[in-house]
Amino acid sequence: MRVSLTKKQQQTEAGIELLQLCQTVTDDGHLSDAEIQDVREWLNENKDCGFESWNHLSAVLDKILADGIVTAEERLQLYKEIVKVLPPDLRELVVARKKEIDRAQKELNSPIDKWDFMVAGVRYEGRPDTIYRYAREGDAVYLWREPKNRFDKNAIAVLLKNAMQIGFVPAEWASQMALELDRGQPHRASIRKLLTAGRSPIPVVVASIYSANSTLENLIFERDVPQIVLPTVSRSEVFWCQKCGNKLYASEGLYCDRCQAAPGLPATPAVARPEPAPVRIMPIRPVDRSNQSDNLVGWALVLLMVVCLVAYCSYSTR
């Protein structure tokens, strides 16, 4: 079934309007809501035109608008159906231009650079407990620049969705990443996996930075990164390992290095309990050694008497 406009139809007033409309809405390779509404209005105003293209577009548009929502796939489908209405010579030009637009859009939406790294500094400031409680594989994370960091001007903090910090981007990657973030480029990052075999859990993060002109959704700009939330656990608070009773401090992280869990399993979490009462130790009275020599002489005399008694008994029995 032919749906493109014939030469005879192109000479009619309705045909001229439809041809101009199809060329206009397909010019940028994308259908906006306003352009879809323009097509709908033309169909409503030209119900009696008798074009096969009218029947085709009307059926497609009614199906797409039935639920009141136009998805990206439905926009693309309607775009392709509108292109079919164009005469063959114009259709080829529109298809070629669409390919160029798609190629440029793909390049624009491709990452400027990608990184895959283990988060650094995870053992400080109670971060092991934060990671154990809140970090999960697949979770999105934020990258926050800290240009005034006293240790590294390229420092980039890694934050969870709840704005709690789990560490930093390693220094060898931070210098490259900081350059792009300082230019206002957005990023997208997530936890690829959690390494739990060591003393503290270590998140492995994959991060990508994109052009500020990218049309991708859910990219994170600097304005989207929340203010850092500090841990609520007191650094001096005392904890005990639930498994072996090892004493821990919040400042060192709530993971026990005495009873490490098997590789691939989370380490045993520590649980708080009251400080035990101190054990009272009675002092031991020192030994007086001033008469030690007199005691030795006494014992020597006793031993001599025993020897003499044994000798006398032995002689009398003969």
Image: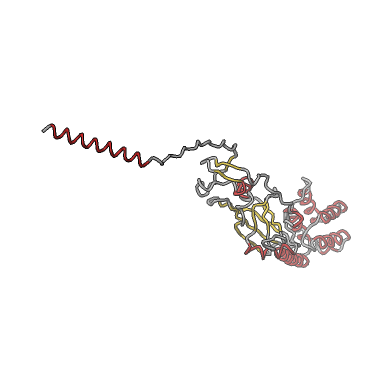
Residue 267 position in % (x across, y down): 54, 46
- In the drawing, does residue 273 fall left or right of residue 316? right
**Towards the viewer: 223 or 21:** 223
Residue 49 is left or right of residue 243, and the answer is right
Rendering quarter of residue 296 = top left
Q: Is residue 269 above or below residue 157?
A: above
| Quadrant of the image occupied by residue 237 | top right
Q: Is residue 263 visible?
A: yes
Side of 55 relative to 194 (left or right): right
Horizontal relation, residue 265 to residue 219: left or right: left
Determine whether 263 is above or below 286 in the image: below
Q: How is the image coloured?
A: secondary structure
Which residue is pictured at 28% across the width and 38% down the height?
A: 301
Q: Residue placed at 59% from the left, 42% from the top?
A: 239
Q: Nearer the viewer, residue 293 or 221?
A: 293
- Expressed as whole percent of the image width and height from the top left, the position of residue 255 reads 57, 47
Specify whether residue 266 is in view.
no
Residue 104 pos. (x, y %): 73, 66
Q: Position of residue 254 (x, y in %)?
A: 59, 46
- Residue situated in front as seen by the camera: 309 or 237: 309
